[in-house]
Amino acid sequence: MKITQNQYFNKSKYLSSSKLNFPYEPKHTCDISSGYIQSKNLSLFQGVSEELDCGGNSTFEYAYFLLTNLKKSNINIYVRNSLISNLSANPIMINIYYCVKDVVGNLDKSNFTTIANSNASGKLPHGKILFGNDLEKIYGIYGQNLVVSPYSTYNCRENGGIVISPGFSYLFEFSSINTNITSNFTMSFSWWEEDISSYID
């Protein structure tokens, strides 16, 4: 069937696009938390810790994972997401601390951090992933808790809502719900970094 234009519509003269006056020029946008802009600017990073355990046959009651920003970094860290993987048959409890300024204890540093843009090389992040069981004191703000079921993964999806300033950390404290069973788990972080000096006129 042939479709023709209705004679009662669009009877006015057509205007060329050059004669149309738009109040603004339309532009494409994207969600800043998606990571596209940061990856394009070579400022998006990701990393994973080594596996830890606690409870049961372990000698430790707690395990700790931190994303930390060095005191003299001159950058802000914007957390994109924090991924928790429970590798055990036991549910785990996670207490989350914000604005952690100092920690007392012994922690290891992850060597598995990289820039997310696979076309770039040689740029290392200022942010560090720390992990370990030997932590004596936490100086920070206890903000929320999570329970992660056995053999499952939980994605916190901060989407840039958590900002880590120089000298501060974002800390996760793990413990076994059933203390008679050893729980083991790992964490990964994704974040972007921005120079503080770029905000100063």
Image (spheres, helix red, strand yellow):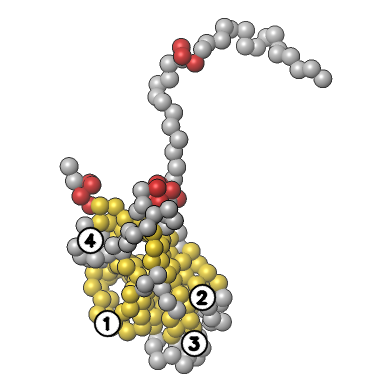
Residue 182 at x, y percent in the picture: 49, 87
The answer to whether residue 96 is above or below residue 123 is below
Nearer-N-terminus badge (1/2): 2
Residue at x 43%, y 81% (from the top left corner): 52
Residue at x 42%, y 57% (from the top left corner): 116
Residue 74 horizontal side relative to residue 81, left or right: left
Q: Which residue is mark 4?
A: 73
Are there few (<14), some (14-19), or many (20+) residues within 10 Å of tag 2? many
The amino acid type, in three-letter code, at marker 2 is Asn
Residue 93 horizontal side relative to residue 139, left or right: right
The answer to whether residue 30 is above or below residue 102 is above
Q: Marks 4/3: CA distance?
A: 37 Å
The amino acid type, in three-letter code, at marker 1 is Gly
Mark 4 lies on a secondary structure that is loop
Q: Which mark is residue 182?
A: 3
Tell me the quarter of the image containing the N terminus: top right
Q: Which mark is residue 86?
A: 2
Q: Marks 1/2: CA distance?
A: 24 Å
Are there few (<14), some (14-19), or many (20+) residues within 10 Å of tag 1? few
Residue at x 79%, y 17% (from the top left corner): 2
